[in-house]
Image (spheres, coloured by chain):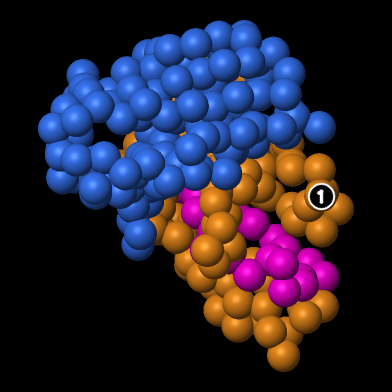
Chain colours: A orange, B blue
Amino acid sequence: EVQLVESGGGLVQPGGSLRLSCATSGFTFTSYWMSWVRQAPGKGLEWVGNIEEDGSVKNYEDSLRGRFTIFRDNAKNTLYLQMNNLGAKDTAVYYCARDLGGGYNWNYQGSDCWGQGTLVTVSS
Amino acid sequence: EMMMTQSPATLSVSPGEIATLSCRASQSLSNNVAWYQHKPGQAPRLLIYGASTRATGIPDRFSGSGSGTEFTLTISSLQSEDFAVYYCQQYNKWPRAFGQGTKVEIK
């Protein structure tokens, strides 16, 4: 059974940092691009970024590039999201997801498996 | 900047009826659009990719159509489990983007 389990969320002060993890199992992690998507309270889904199978290629939402970094540890089958200089607008549930088909737009077939999400709250 | 506009924001439908959801893009997307279903407290669920290809395990009452800038998700004969928020997602250009969602509620 494919499983993605996010962790690392919590309360953080404005300007702080947080690292989210997404532990995966039930599939060959090294064969898939992986994505992060977030949902602020009462808002819709927002794509954060994705990362290639070996971690060499990363794409980000323009407004988050420079503050957010996606990386992965293929030995641990785990995806990460490092978030720096957090502000109130970063308060959201953060989901990790598996990209089907590939991570490039020409071969992407949607994100077919998702975790349940981890809540990040930025507040003083 | 690519803009994805979904309409209507809320759709009130009776069980057994048809729901038609629209997604419009500010630039041509070819057929690089996916649709997702999202229920509160749950993980999003992939329904459609390539504008019209159903994902694995998705019932055939869900169908997608369109190309270019106009896309449609049709749910025929709505079931109780179909009441949720639906999002389109473009993946024709970086960064990928979701529409703002259409909530399908019970009439």
Q: Which structural element holds mark 1?
A: loop
Q: Where is residue A87 in the image (x, y as percent from the top left)?
A: 77, 72
Amino acid type, residue under disc 1 in the picture? Ser
**Is B83 placed left or right of B26 in the picture?**
left
Q: Is residue A82 magenta?
A: yes
The residue closer to the viewer here, B6 or A21, is B6
**Is B70 placed left or right of B50 in the picture?**
right
Image quadrant holding the N terminus of chain B, namely top right
Instruction: Please report the residue visible at 74 percent of the width from the left and 42 percent of the height from the top.
Output: A60
Residue B73, compared with residue A21, is above or below; it is above
| Residue B2 lies in quadrant | top right
- Chain containing the residue with disc 1: A
Instruction: Please report the residue visible at 67 percent of the width from the left and 78 percent of the height from the top.
Output: A122
Q: Position of residue B33 (x, y in %)?
A: 53, 21
Residue B98, compared with residue A70, is above or below; it is above
Q: Does the magenta stretch include residue B16?
A: no
Magenta stretch in the rendered image: A75-98
**Is A9 placed left or right of B103 in the picture?**
right
Instruction: Please report the residue visible at 51 percent of the width from the left and 70 percent of the height from the top.
Output: A119
Residue named by callout 1 = A63
Instruction: Please report the residue visible at 34 percent of the width from the left and 52 percent of the height from the top.
Output: B39
Q: Where is residue A51 in the image (x, y as percent from the top left)?
A: 64, 38
| Residue A40 lies in quadrant | bottom right
Q: Does the rendering let one see residue A30? A: no
The residue closer to the viewer here, A46 or B65, is B65
- What is the residue that sits farthest to the right in this orientation? A66
